[in-house]
Amino acid sequence: MGIALWRQVADQIRQSILIGMAANERLPAEAELASRFGVNRHTVRAAIAALEKEGILRAEQGRGTFLNESKRLRYPIGRRTRFSSGLENQAQTRSGKLLSSETMPAPARVSAALSLPAQSLVIELSTVSTADGVPISAASSWFDAARFLAISKLYAETGSITASLARLGIDDYTRETTAVEAQHASSEDLDLLALSPGAIVLLTRSVDVDAGGLPIQYGESRFAADRVELFIENAR
C-alpha cells in the first residue's frame, strides 16, 4: 500500500507541479507537498527520490530540490516513421541494439495485425534504442518468418529496422496504424530504460505495410515519457 502511495505521489508531482515549472526552478518544500497531497513527509521524500533517480529533479544540500534542465525529444509518428531520421536533428547519435530474437507461433494479436493465419511462425525481435547514449525506447517487433527469415541477423548487424528491411528487398514502407497509451513501466522496462519504480512509459502499438499494402511489421514500443513526446503528424 505504501509503495503504491509514493508512486501515486510521484505521478502527481509530474503532472501537477512540474507542468509549467521552469528549468532550475525550486520544488515546494516537503511539508507543503505533504499537505497538498494528504500524505506524510516520508511518502513525499520517497517520491522525490524516485524522480531524482530518473534525472527529473536534483537535490542541492542546504538549498532544496530543483527541476533539472532537460528537453524532451520529439518523436514524429506519421506515414514514414523512422527512429533514426526522426531524431536526426535532435541527437548526434542514434542506435538500436538487439537484445534477443525468437521464432514462435504468432500470438493472436500478432497474427491478426500481420494478416497471417493463426499460429503462423513469426520472428520476435526485442530491442532497445538510444539517443546520445540515453535509452529512449524498448520494443518488441514481429515479422512473418516465411518472408523475413534473416531479419534478426540483419538487425544485429545494422541496428536499424529500415536498413534490415532494405536488405530484404523492402525499399520503402509506411505506417498504417498507431495506437498510443500511457502506463507504468514494467520491471523489465525499468532496467532497460534506466527508470525508477513508478515511471511512466508511452506504449505504441503499430502496423507497418509495404508498397503493396501488405503488413510487414507489428510493433509494441515503450518510450520513456519523461524523455520523449510523441508528435502525431497528419498525412498530406
Image (cartoon, helix red, strand yellow):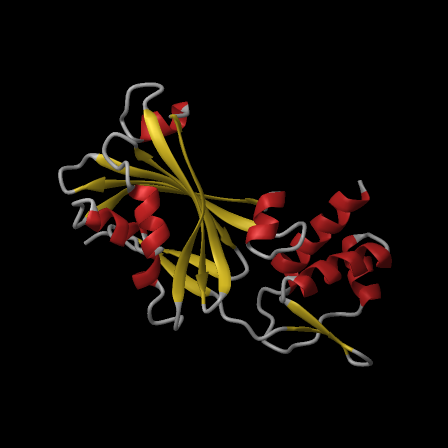
Q: Is residue 66 left or right of residue 149?
A: right
Taking depth in this image into account, of 200 and 134 the one nearest to the observer is 134
Can you give x and y, in whole percent of width and height, for residue 113 in the image?
32, 30
- Residue shown at 69% from the left, 72% from the top: 58
On screen, residue 169 above or below 105: below
Q: Is residue 232 visible?
A: no
- Residue shown at 47% from the left, 60% from the top: 228
**Quarter of the image holding residue 109?**
top left
- Residue shown at 40% from the left, 61% from the top: 95
Total tally of numbered discs in the picture: 0
Q: Is residue 167 left or right of residue 32?
A: left
- Residue shown at 51% from the left, 64% from the top: 134
Can you give x and y, in whole percent of width and height, for residue 43 in the image?
81, 54
Quadrant for the C terminus in the image? bottom left
Can you give x and y, in whole percent of width and height, for residue 79 in the image?
24, 50
On screen, residue 130 above or below 93: above
Q: Residue furthest bottom?
A: 62
Q: Residue furthest top?
A: 118
